[in-house]
Image (spheres, helix red, strand yellow):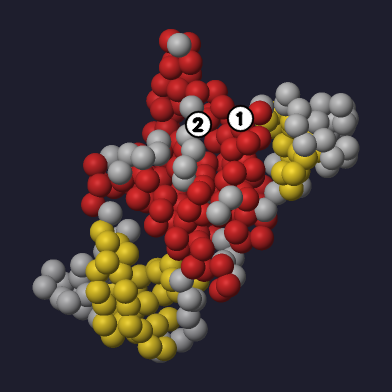
Amino acid sequence: MKESDKVITVLTKELGVISIYAKGAMRLKNKFHSSTGVFTYSEFVIFEGRGDKMYQLNEAVVKKVFYNLSDSVENIALAMYMSELVCEAVVPDEVSNDILRLFLNCLYMLCEGKWSLLMTKAAFEMRLMSDIGFRPNLVGCKRCNEYQKDIFWFDTEEGYLVCPDCKQNYDVGYSISEPPVTLALRYLALADLEQMFSFRLKGFSLIQLGHICEKYVLNHTKDSYKTLDFLKPLIKPLIEAEIESVKGS
């Protein structure tokens, strides 16, 4: 708007993703400068103005700044990708608070090193899709209702499991899901948010989970993300490290 002003994109618990006009926020001494920083959790008082979905910032208080993200370009890249996903997804107002809590918890787990980057990425992708209306059917095989098998095949387009006995030759685009991966998918999609962060996955199972979750997102939103293109070369060494850890053990 002006050289010293900002228009920020904000994920809120009441209104979903909105745009807010912050007058003078580019100035270091401005009262809104800290609270409108990227990846900052703040409490805002806003009022309507400046057209559709554009609000005016009146008051702001910083609640949490995720400083540790800047310790790693990989962490920053993942946070950027999660932000683009949220902006691309249509977030119903009734689940806005759930999405905000998911985002904040994933940033916390990432910053504190409680989850690996690969685990955080997969968890955010699957849970976001589940909460905005694309929760896959993971109870059992869609065709025979078998709950437990040595492996399942996951349809990343339709979002259901098929067991090897029911999979047909014409079934294409399926990803293999071994027992730890199937359990992880069920947990990420169906568990309470507080409980979702209580498990870990490593090695080939983590790589397999990441492949499924990413493919599921791309099949249900759009074909590509610039932030994902930037992130992929950065996580390649992490994937290789997971493979080496399995070989070493």
Relative to 114, residue 177 above or below: above
Type of amino acid at the residue the image marks with label 1: Pro
Marks 2 and 1 close (CB-CB < 8 Å): yes
Q: Residues within 10 Å of mark 1 (few under 14, many from 20)?
A: some
Residue at 41% from the left image edge and 88% from the top image edge:
48
| Residue 151 x, y percent position in the rendering | 73, 26
In the picture, the disc for residue 201 is: 2
Type of amino acid at the residue the image marks with label 2: Leu
Relative to 208, residue 103 above or below: below
Cα distance between the residues tagged 2 and 1: 8 Å
As drawn, the residue found furthest toward the top would be 248
Foreground pick, 112 / 170: 112
Label 2 sits on a secondary structure element that is loop
Q: Earlier in the sequence, mark 2 or mark 1?
A: 1
**Residue 225 as seen in the image, left or right of residue 157:** left
Q: Residues within 10 Å of mark 2 (few under 14, many from 20)?
A: some
Residue 79 in view in this figure: no
Residue at 44% from the left image edge and 15% from the top image edge:
244
Image quarter (top left, top right, bottom left or bottom right) of the N terminus: bottom left
Relative to 223, residue 1 above or below: below
Residue at 32% from the left image edge and 58% from the top image edge:
39
In the picture, the disc for residue 180 is: 1
Relative to 247, residue 152 above or below: below
Image quarter (top left, top right, bottom left or bottom right) of the C terminus: top left
**Residue 215 as seen in the image, left or right of residue 143:** left
| Residue 36 x, y percent position in the rendering | 28, 69
Residue at 40% from the left image edge and 39% from the top image edge:
115
As drawn, the residue found furthest toward the left would be 29
Foreground pick, 66 / 139: 139
**Residue 239 as seen in the image, left or right of residue 184:** left
| Residue 85 x, y percent position in the rendering | 51, 55
| Residue 40 x, y percent position in the rendering | 30, 62
